[in-house]
Amino acid sequence: MNRVKTYVEGLDSRLEDGIPHGHIVLVSGTSGTLKSTLSFNIIYNHAKETKQRALYLSLEQNQASLFRHMKKLGMDIDVVKDYITVMDFGWMRRELKDSSGDSVDWLEALEFQIRNYKEKEDYKVLVFDSLAALYAVGNMDNPRGELFHFFEFLREMDITAFLISEMPEDRKSYGLYGVESFLADGIIHLDMERSGRSVGRFINVVKMREVKHSTDFFPLLVDSSGFKIVKK
Amino acid sequence: MVAPQIRNIEVVLEEWMGPMSKFVLSKQMADANVDPNAPTQGSLVELVDLLEDRCLHKMLSDSKVPAVKEDLLKAIKKPLNMEEEKAIELNRKINNYLREKFGDVAIYTLNLEKKKRGIDDITTTDDLLALADGIKSILDEMVEENISTSVYNGLVNIIKEMED
């Protein structure tokens, strides 16, 4: 089976060599837990290794800022620029803020882009950044129902999708509405823990359908060489 | 009534931006002071530049931007009326006829003659008939009279056929 690796050193071997193609995976965590960075790192390395295309659809950070951040982490963006498209919907949010943009059906517009780029570019991996931003602009009347349809739509696209999901501070669910974790095929949870003056990072795979995996929390290290877990 | 160039731009943007395209376009038109009913060519060029800077680079991969911009530039070209289209077709036929008879040097001569008379590709039948006269007088000095008369008659036939 085709897999998409997490490119977290030490984690892929605990996931039977990666995430099955076609899975929809939540990348969840509270603010500042490097959800976007981990997700971009996945498509960056996936593109370098497989030459497959990926789409990073951002409702938050703009392309220039995202690239600057990733370059600081040691990624050579030029190497993958033909394989990764960053679609900056944050710009569109700002652009339409004072116009008739209130009447835009954002979910429909986003689905159009996801489908359109699939048809035109045949990308294999999507990063959607983020569900929280979608909720902020989406004006969803029936969020649980609309999320169900959104997940079904993604499944039909035949892509591996990483949906960045902001966890509530109480950490009781992996998404705002609670249904995200049922709908997703996998959940990668990023966390931080303060100890004195330092902050430790952690990662655990809460759920990954069709994969035997550990649900342990692993200390997570991030430096210019990438992500790695500290083995027990 | 919305100008055809604006409708053409909508079609190009729709293909790439879907439901967002009309909002994006109306915002950029406001910023570029484009009158959607009667846009000037200058404002349309500015609009395409704005769309490239503000939209295409945000929504498309870098490799796609030049092709879509080219589509936008095609979209803003002034539409020709039937008379103008007919005149261009006529010029094309004259070019082909002369090239067939005398090769590329004839086209060079034709273009010099047009320049001298201030005639461009979109012109009237009378101008073209005068042009045929001019070409005949050049040919009279270069080739035998029966050849120059034959070319002149050929040109006049093309012009008359198009007029009919």
Image (spheres, coloured by chain):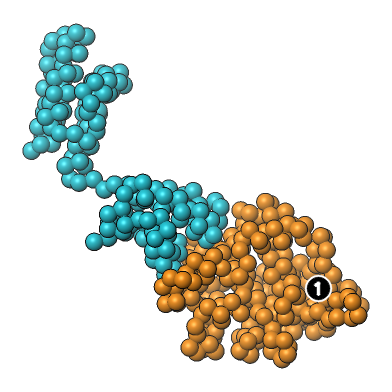
| A216 with respect to A211 (left or right) | right
| A83 with respect to B6 (left or right) | right
| B114 with respect to A227 (left or right) | left
Q: Residue furthest left?
A: B164
The one of A5 and A43 positioned closer to us in this rendering: A43
The one of A114 and A31 positioned closer to us in this rendering: A31
What tint does the image give chain B? Answer: cyan
The relative height of residue A202 versus residue B20 in the rendered view (above or below) is below
Classify the position of the C terminus of chain A by image quarter.
bottom right
Residue drawn at x 36%, y 51% is B44
Residue that mark 1 sits on? A11
Residue B90 location, quadrant: top left
Q: Amino acid at mark 1?
A: Leu
Classify the position of the N terminus of chain A by image quarter.
bottom right
Residue B1 position in % (x across, y down): 24, 61
Residue drawn at x 45%, y 61% is B16
Residue B96 location, quadrant: top left
Residue A2 position in % (x across, y down): 67, 69
Label 1 residue SS: loop
Residue drawn at x 85%, y 76% is A199
Tell which chain the image draws in orange: A
